[in-house]
Amino acid sequence: MERLMSLHTRTWRGAVFGAAVIVLSACQTTSTKTPETEPLDGVQRTLFQAGRDSELAHKYEAAAGAYGRLSEMRPNDPAVLASFLRNMRYSGRARDVLKYLDDKPQELLSDKDVQFEQAKAYLAAGKKNEALMILRTVQEKLPGDWRVYSALGITLDALALYDDAQFNYQKALAISPNNEVVLNNLAMSLAMTGKLKAAIEALETAAGVNRNNQQIRQNLALLYAINGQVDRAKTLAAMDLDAGDLETNMSFYRRFERSPQ
């Protein structure tokens, strides 16, 4: 489930961040785990390799197609099913994921990886309470997995339970220190609750962890602007945007031009 919003085509919700990017990213949740049941035969191994390669290349529809065919051959393999569900969701077909799971046996639906994908599909489909309920179950099965706490944080943010969301992001960071995805989402949650200084600090850390992450850089530019640091925001935004998009963003940023907090 990606909640990725174009910086120059959205508006702020209230005083904070309708334009920002909240990320449950593909790189965060991608798995290349080998199926867990019977060994793969030649055709199945080819499909598995095609699915894995397509997913790593962000060709999610092709990956879903390969994993879907493999799942038909291995209907009781939870690892293959989870890979299929994940790539269906990445392809923007979260509601199809939920329909697809309707007639699956309980044994498959109780698998932790399948449940995790089901929860993220619920969230992507806007069914936040259902997502939270399943994630609580997954949390008990995967207590040391930072991805679960990160997903809980995003779900709780979506439910406007910001303090609980931030608690879960901190739990994720305790397991995976300086994780750029978690830091980004923590920063956006902090910004939503008016903790702008802490939000900027979190994003500055994330930007330092990965200097090639444009989403984080543009989120940081946005928070700089809201903090009244419009010139600094422009310098950062200019690293990724062409002249037209930069000017569009600057028109938006100037709404916040004032003395820094």
Image (spheres, rainbow, N blue to C red):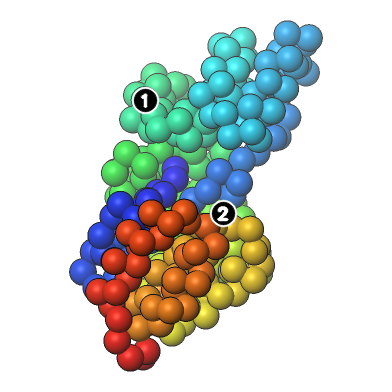
Mark 2 secondary-structure assignment? helix
Does any portion of residue 175 appear in the rendered image? no
Q: Which image quadrant is residue 229 in?
A: bottom left
- Name the residue rendered at 54%, 17% in the picture: 65
- Name the residue rendered at 77%, 11% in the picture: 41
Q: Is residue 41 left or right of residue 77?
A: right
Would you call the spot at circle 1 few (<14 residues within 10 Å), some (14-19), or many (20 or more)? Answer: some
| Residue assigned mark 2 | 147
| Residue assigned mark 1 | 96
Q: Is residue 36 above or below residue 113?
A: above
Q: Is residue 232 left or right of residue 13?
A: right
Q: Position of residue 113 (x, y in %)?
A: 56, 38
Q: Position of residue 20 (x, y in %)?
A: 38, 61
For this orientation, the residue located farthest to the left is 14
What amino acid type is highlighted by mark number 2? Arg
Q: Position of residue 108 (x, y in %)?
A: 52, 27
For this orientation, the residue located farthest to the front is 243
- Name the residue rendered at 29%, 66% in the picture: 251
Mark 1 secondary-structure assignment? helix
What amino acid type is highlighted by mark number 1? Asp
Q: Position of residue 194 (x, y in %)?
A: 32, 80
